[in-house]
Image: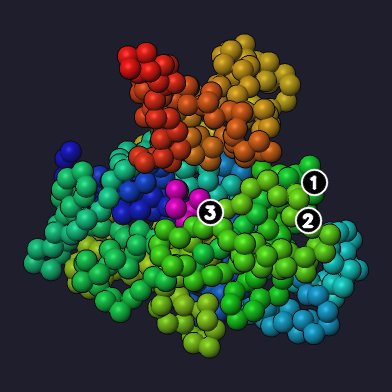
Amino acid sequence: MEKIDVVIIGGGVVGCMTARFLSRYKLNILLIDKEADVGSSTSAANSAIVHAGYDPLPGTLKAEMNVKGNQMWDVLSGELGFEYDRSGDYVVAVGKEELPILDELLEQGRRNGVPGMHIIPADEMRAREPEINPAVSGALWAPTGGICDPFMATIAAAENAVENGVTVMLNTRFLDFRIENGRVTGVQTSRGFFACRWVVNSAGLYSDEVMHLAGVRPEFQITPRRGEYVVLDRASIQVNNVLFPVPTAKGKGILVTATTHGNTIVGPNSVCAAHKKDEEVTQEGLAEIWEGARKLFPHLQPSSTIAMFAGLRATGNAPSPNPQVSYGHDFVIEAAEKPRGFINLGGIESPGFTAAPAIAQRVVELMQDQGEKLEEKTGWNPIRAPRPHFRKLPLDEQKKLIHTDPRYGRVVCRCEMVTEGEIVAEIHAPIPALTYDAIKRRTWLGTGRCLGSFDMPRVVEILARETGLPPEQITKRGPGSEFLYRRTKELEVLHDQE
């Protein structure tokens, strides 16, 4: 590979957005990620909400990046072709004692520059969400909040970056820096050494380890916080809005929210995780989630659950203006003085997803401030064309698609109506979906009531056929998660030989 200008460490939403924003310029860019797909860590397990910006403490980078990022999502979703709905969100007060907190959030949001917020009375809240707790006393309405498909937002940004010349290397672990005369000159990875002039640390949960290898912020530490969620069957309950409880010193609380996929999600809690891979769903966590959810919707039942999952927040310890707030630690977004050429992003927890495009733009500005002469490409294309989702198409368009490619007429996932044509298209996309989970995040197969029990064998077969790999090498999420050990016929042969 020719000499690289910029290496981006980490393929979550921040890394992928950064790659996409930098792809506008005449730079040779490499994005690396240790997982088998982009967006496989924190970006794959979140609330899928584009926050309005009233929650972060005024004066923080979180507040600034939240509000700036929020304003960018309409254009981004149009250019990159992923689902986004600026539906607004609510903070719901239950009981008169919680009403003063709404006034505090309203004032805080105004100080952060969030437009259009106002408090609505209890009867109006009940009219907007009929199943809400009858004891609701009012709500803060923020019309700039929204919901998004977080998987495709990350993937689409990475695909558009690739279409504009960025190289993405997956299953590639960052190991160390080469630093000469006070400047970054390269990175050592599990797939070799790459000389470069710039490195962007967007390693999420591991951003502290990366910056320490560069000799930057030795006091900075990521403490992973686990958030557990449940996904509800859309046939059992349909929530229309994004609904937060009033926040506490621990965080935003257990929310109940609609999603772009039609399900309702409940969660998350906030628990200090034992380690950076602690994605366990616990009985204690589920009990906490249901207690919080029933504060907003007393009639919710665990029997409506079709899936459970947990994600980790990359909670840093950078100081905030109010040290009394336990979740008030700020983002780190900086160009290091030493070594030069190192852009450091750390502690990018909530509202990190919302802030991602603003952070990416800030990376561009930091490089320019450090003297990088960025020249725009004449042929840069901001548009990434979405691939068809069969079940969302009108009947006449479905017929046309099947006529063009009969594979779109073969349904593989019955719950979510995902076809073979869609699966094959994702396997051969600019960021190829080469694992079951990668296809799942792109098409939504395996997320219905049967949780993939019907489609999994067929998906393994299609992946093996399209990649030329034996079925035993097809994985759920990368090496070590293979579905199959050997064919049962081999057991019969071995038995006969005995």
* Residue on which the image places disc 3: 45
Range covered by the magenta-colored residues: 39-45
Which amino acid type corresponds to the residue marked 3 in the rendered image? Ala
Contact flag, marks 2 and 1 (Cβ < 8 Å): yes
Residue 114 quadrant: bottom right
> Which numbered disc flags the more N-terminal residue, 2 or 3?
3
| Secondary element at image label 1 | loop
- Sort mark 1 into few (<14), some (14-19) or many (20+) by Cα contacts within 10 Å: few
For residue 301, the mark is: 2
Name the residue tied to disc 1.
236
Instruction: Give the answer, above or below, for where 451 lies relative to 337.
Output: above
81 over 280 or under it: above or below:
above
Residue at the spot 69% in from the left edge and 38% down from the top edge: 449
**Residue occupying image coordinates x 87% and y 73%:** 135
Q: Which of marks 3 and 1 is nearer the N terminus?
A: 3
Could you say where residue 495 lies in the image, as x and y percent from the top left?
38, 18
Left or right: 429 as drawn, with respect to 455: left
Contact check, label 3 and label 1, Cβ < 8 Å: no
Residue 330, horizontal then vertical, whole percent: 45, 75
Q: Can I make out residue 452 in this image?
A: yes
Q: How many labels does the image show?
A: 3
Please give the name of the residue rendered at 49% of the width and 87% of the height, measured from the top-left corner.
323
Q: Position of residue 216 (x, y in %)?
A: 25, 72
Instruction: Please state which amino acid type lies under the numbered disc 2.
Output: Gln
Judge depth for marks 2 and 1 and give the one in front.
Answer: 2
Circle 3 or circle 1, nearest the eye = 1
Q: Distance between the residues labelled 2 and 1?
A: 9 Å
